[in-house]
Amino acid sequence: MSLYMADDFDYTTEEDEDMANVGGDVTDEDNFYGSDGEAIYDDDDMPAKKRGTSAAQARRGRDIQGIPWRRLNISRENYRKTRLEHYKNYENVSSSGQLIDKKFKQMEKGGNYYEFHHNTRLVNPTVLHFQLRNLVWATTKHDAYLMSHYSVMHWSSLSQKLSKILDFSGHVAPVEKHPGSLIEGFTQTQISTLAVKDNLMVAGGFLGELTCKRLDRKGVSFCTKMTYDENSITNSIDIFNTLSGGVHFIASNNDSGIREYDVETFQLLHHFRFPWPVNHTSMSPDCKLIMVVGDHLDGLLVDSRSGKTFSPLVGHLDYSFASAWHPDGFTFATGNQDKTCRMWDIRNLSSPTTVLKGNLGAVRSIHFSSDGQFMAVAEPADFVHVYSTKADYKKRQEIDFFGEISGVSLSPDDESLFIGVWDRTYASLLQYNRRHAYSYLDSFL
């Protein structure tokens, strides 16, 4: 993974600059967050230009992001065309995306699995590193956690309240005692990746820091520095349940290592090293295999106990930054800067079973629904694709908006899909709700 942070790269076009001036400057987070972690404002208290958009307003014609297209010198359709033509996809292997564009076509659009519910501009998602986009996590259909500058924030769509969970701009230190925990903690930690599951939050830092907090307790539980390597960005964190009922997590690092921790004791269980920086890992549902992708064209399936390679994954043309297992334990997906998400079957790993091509950029995030019916795939900006697994990934819903994506997350019950939009003017959190066909109601007609 590149050592550069998000501010070192500019993906905007001239039309982007025009749009950025429409809504005025993005308001600083300190104007909205109280020091006690309670939200000072809710959505109704916001100035008109910063209020969100409801499903009812969208049905009446309001843009879901609040972009006033009638006041702009360009239509939405023309701006979309311009974005598709000029957006610069970052590649480590030159022309990898162009080769894909020539070889593969996109799957059919037309799926309608999740419908727009609400967009709040009270929330201001941010990204530290342009290649790392796992900064939004849903714990229920109403609750989402995300990074906003130095702070982990909690958004409740039920109460429409925003609150601060943990502020990394100052001093953060553990209140619990665990072997290996840094009692002195950290100061001004730059958070590169985040994971939240149930009541556990794990944040990874730009210099190899790990901070663990239980959301049902006050204070931080555990702090450690995984490595003192000069190339030590924490690239991803995967929290998973073990077969014995415990909770573990794996941290992937730019120092070419992955480390597995037991959440009960916060002790390091395994440390496996690879020939290249590891950008993302995913534990299989049976906890026997770990999918490992990073700064190499090929991914790896490795044994979770020994770290030995079970099989290489050959097919991508660039570096990979996303991976996910289907709940069935046979199918899994990898996301790459060659603009593809590739599907694999553990029963035949000679080649991908399906290649899914994006619109404008790398695949930065992948999530399967808990019931296995859908797979959400996020590009770096503007598009999230929801594929139907029942249709063998040949049909998709395309969620279309404008802005860099800080993260995408499905709630554990699959009822909500949250998308963090990182933008100077239209930063927000989009929420889509799962559509249901209540056919039994037809009997009343």
Image: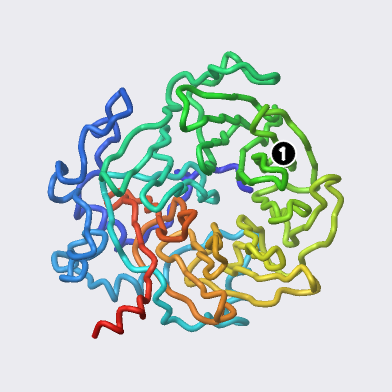
The tally of labels here is 1
Q: Quadrant of residue 18?
A: bottom left
Which residue corresponds to the image point at 43% horizontal and 25% vertical from the top-left?
169
Q: Is residue 242 left or right of residue 338?
A: right
Work out whether 173 lies above or below 322: above
* Residue ID for mark 1: 260
Which residue corresponds to the image point at 22% horizontal and 58% vertical from the top-left?
53
Work out whether 303 lies above or below 58: above
Residue 100, percent from left and from top? 61, 75
Q: Quadrant of residue 435?
A: bottom left
Which residue corresponds to the image point at 61% horizontal and 47% vertical from the top-left?
2
Compare residues 88 and 108 and report the one nearer the observer.
108
Compare residues 236 and 395 and report the one nearer the observer.
395
Residue 67, percent from left and from top? 22, 61
**Residue 369 visible in the snapshot:** yes
**Amino acid carrying mark 1 in the image:** Glu
**Residue 295 visible in the snapshot:** no
Colour scheme shown: rainbow
Residue 142, percent from left and from top? 36, 50
Single out the residue that lies furthest toward the top. 184
Work out whether 311 lies above or below 445: above
Please tell me how crowded label 1 is: few (under 14), some (14-19), or many (20+) other residues with Cα within 10 Å: many
Residue 231, percent from left and from top? 67, 36
Q: In which quadrant will I find the C terminus?
A: bottom left
Which residue corresponds to the image point at 78% horizontal and 53% vertical from the top-left?
288
Single out the residue that lies furthest toward the front. 444
Compare residues 92 and 176 and report the one nearer the observer.
176
Work out whether 396 lies above or below 278: below
Secondary structure found at label 1: strand
Q: Is residue 255 left or right of residue 375?
A: right
